[in-house]
Image (tube, helix red, strand yellow):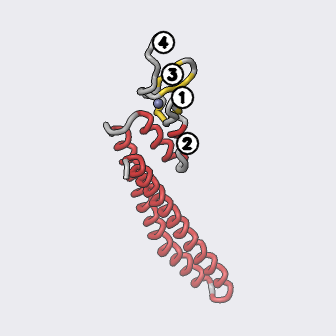
């Protein structure tokens, strides 16, 4: 497993945790609203006290769930912040790779960010990072196949 894959998986995990937190928050609100609505509906038959009790129950049940969602989402955000710092300061990654990982984080799929930074050697056809490739007469070459400068 290379560094890029590892960071991509880690970012995916951070997003998944954050998403789970958001879902839990919505569930907490939905539960509170559902209980309040049920109480409001029941209040007509069973009296205002029941309606009020349902409202309180909704808040008591919904709020901790919402709070749990906030905590879970925060974990995902902390992980993402940690990853951003790690990626940015890694001596093992090139600037292109850092940019690639960062854009992966935002757009989340494909390898488009990497492809746009890569060129094909006109001689051997291998994919070369634009940073280390050589351009000559409007053609790209890898370092090995680059024509001697001035030629
Ligand atoms: Zn080549």
The residue to which callout 4 is attached is 151
The residue to which callout 2 is attached is 112
* Helix, strand or loop under label 3: strand
Total marks in image: 4
Residue 151 vs 45, above or below: the answer is above
User: In this rendering, would 13 be left or right of 45?
Assistant: left
Q: Which tag is nearer the camera, tag 2 or tag 3?
A: 3
The residue to which callout 1 is attached is 122
Residue 148 vs 17, above or below: the answer is above
- Circle 1/circle 3 CB separation < 8 Å: no
- Circle 2/circle 1 CB separation < 8 Å: no
Crowding near pointer 3: few (<14 within 10 Å), some, many (20+)?
some
Crowding near pointer 2: few (<14 within 10 Å), some, many (20+)?
few
The residue to which callout 3 is attached is 135
User: In this rendering, would 88 be left or right of 51?
Assistant: left
* Helix, strand or loop under label 4: loop
- Alpha carbons under labels 1 and 3: distance apart: 10 Å
* Helix, strand or loop under label 2: helix
What residue is at 63 percent from the left and 89 percent from the top? 46
What residue is at 48 percent from the left and 12 percent from the top? 151
Tell which of 56 and 115 is nearer to you: 115
């Amino acid at each position: 497993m290379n560094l890029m894959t590892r960071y991509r998986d880690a970012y995916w995990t951070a997003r998944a945790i954050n998403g789970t937190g958001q879902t839990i928050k919505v569930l907490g609100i939905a539960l509170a609203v559902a209980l309040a609505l049920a109480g409001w509906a029941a209040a007509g038959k069973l009296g205002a006290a029941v309606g009020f009790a349902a409202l309180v129950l909704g808040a008591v049940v919904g709020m901790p769930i919402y709070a749990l969602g906030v905590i879970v989402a925060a974990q995902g955000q902390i992980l993402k912040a940690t990853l951003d710092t790690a990626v940015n300061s890694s001596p093992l990654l090139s600037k292109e790779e850092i940019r690639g990982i960062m854009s992966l984080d935002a757009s989340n799929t494909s390898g488009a960010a990497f492809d746009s930074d890569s060129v094909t050697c006109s001689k051997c056809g291998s994919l070369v990072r634009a940073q280390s490739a050589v351009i000559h007469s409007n053609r790209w070459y890898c370092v090995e196949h680059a024509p001697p400068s001035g030629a």
